[in-house]
Image (cartoon, helix red, strand yellow):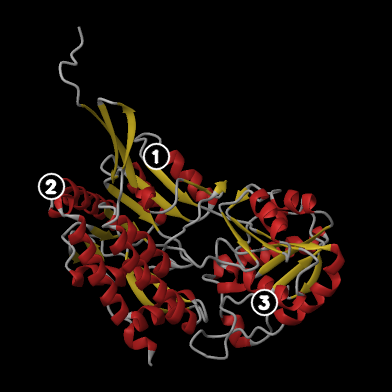
Amino acid sequence: MRPQEYIKQEPYKLYINGEFVVPGERRTFDIINPVNNELFAKAYRAGIKEVEEAVRSAREAYDNGPWGRMPAKERSKLLLKAARILDRRKEEFAATETMECGKLYASALYYEAAQGVDAFEYAAGKARCLEGSSMPIDNQTLNIVQWEPVGVVAEILPWNGPFMMGCQKLSIILAAGNTVVVKPSSWASLSTLLLAEVFDEAGFPKGVVNVLTGSGSLIGNALVQSPLVDMAAMTGGTDTGKSIITASADTIKDIALELGGKSPNIIFDDVDIDEAVKWARFAFTLNAGQVCVSGTRLILHKNIYEEFLGRLKAECEKFVPGDGFDRKTTLSPLIHKEHARIVWEYIEKGKRAGARLICGGKPYEDQELRKGNFVPVTVFADVAVDMEIFQEEIFGPVLCVTPFETEEEAIALANATKFGLAGGVFTRDAKRSMRVAKGIRGGQIYVNSYFSKAMAESPGTGWKESGLGVAGIHKYMISKTIFIDTAEDNVPA
């Protein structure tokens, strides 16, 4: 495979109303490989004019186009067709994610691309299973609750998993019967632009899907503030989520936010230490820690504390950084040099605060690695609750370890941040695992493993400052209650 063959030489175009569009101002931005910070592609940057065109086309497709009248069965067929196209092009998508996001190619192909195809297949089935309900009121009144599409959705994607999450979001938005304007991150735009080609080839009607790339502040604000957009959804940082809430105030549109995390991973002293060490390592190093639900706070029982740290250090020092196309590579770079700078700042904060550095914590000396955004796997022990590295999301391969003695103390430590996205608990005691899982204030809890095995079937919700809105297809729908009076001569006096 020669990955560069998948990349276009001319700038990637926007996708508006079923057409690949060059914006009027013809401005572009650079696509950078985080392995070496070299430019390898360009994409066009949308302006306000293109945002308005995309929103109008999505509005027209929903209100007056064939999409708003299309039976769920026909939407399902289109989603299945898109899944088949994705499956055919999965190597291209995996290579693109590896080049643009620094991912490991094997993971991008066999996991993320597979999850993307599965998302469309799942959504195709879900489109035909959108059930409502009926509620008994009295013998002469029928109460029906239906779920209907919310309308035009503005979806803002993150940079840490743009292809997989883009597939998951867009497929379920369309399965619900909505139209969409999607804005990927400028740090990771190519897979979403390629998805536009999939929708185009599959034959989705004009205006149903629109893709805008460029400035997040300009495009995002314009979408959120537009009165023609019914809903704004975003996956990203908590501060950005707060700005979206503020920007949506004038139009009071529906908002769904999947935000930051600082997820606890509680390990009791009755575990198999070797197994738990590997799970703890996996929980915070997948995609170099750039996963919103990563278990970045290890809450570790005092009885196994030092032994566990020693074995964890040995595991973490086995990572091999490098290009994701190299089969020997096991550690990805961070997405962007600016993000790497922030992660390094947190590492220095941990040192200054007095946390004990177990491994990592200093830049690689290899000159090739220094060209990229590589941060070695870093573990801090004895991390106190009031330290910034305990409280704030770092979003890199950095673990904060804190000891505990009692079950109650472990739960209190788990809940001692503003976040509530996910969490883990490792113990052989089944009753204790359920008590602790119930006690953690988070939307997705893993017991004796880590990370979801059912992202499509059972998506998690964010608690506290980790999110807003329900999970699944109903996130992109709105309920309607209909009362039918069946009585004869039931007329007010």
Q: Position of residue 365 (x, y in %)?
A: 69, 84
As shown in the figure, which amino acid type bears the numbered disc 1?
Ser
Quick check: marks 2 and 3 in contact, CB under 8 Å?
no
Place of residue 489 in the rendered image (x, y in percent of width and height, measured from the top left): 15, 16
Label located before the other in sequence (3 or 1)? 1
Give x and y (percent) for residue 205.
16, 60
User: In the rendered image, which residue does mark 1 sit on?
Assistant: 248
Would you place residue 141 above or below residue 341 in this image? Answer: above
Asked whether 135 or 349 is in front, the reply is 135
Q: Quadrant of residue 172?
A: bottom left
Looking at the rendering, which quadrant does residue 231 occupy? top left
Q: Disc 2 vs disc 1: Cβ atoms closer than 8 Å?
A: no
Query: What residue would you read off at disc 3?
Result: 376
Q: Is residue 420 left or right of residue 152?
A: right
Residue 318 location, x and y as percent?
69, 85
Q: For this rendering, which residue is in front, 296 or 79? A: 79
Q: Residues within 10 Å of mark 1 (few under 14, many from 20)?
A: many
Q: Is residue 190 visible?
A: no
- Tag shown at residue 265: none
Question: In terms of sequence position, does the residue under pointer 2 or pointer 1 come before the other?
Answer: 2
Residue 64's label in the rendered image is: 2
> Of the residues shown, which amino acid type is indicated by label 2?
Asn
Element class at badge 2: loop
Name the outermost residue toward the top. Answer: 493
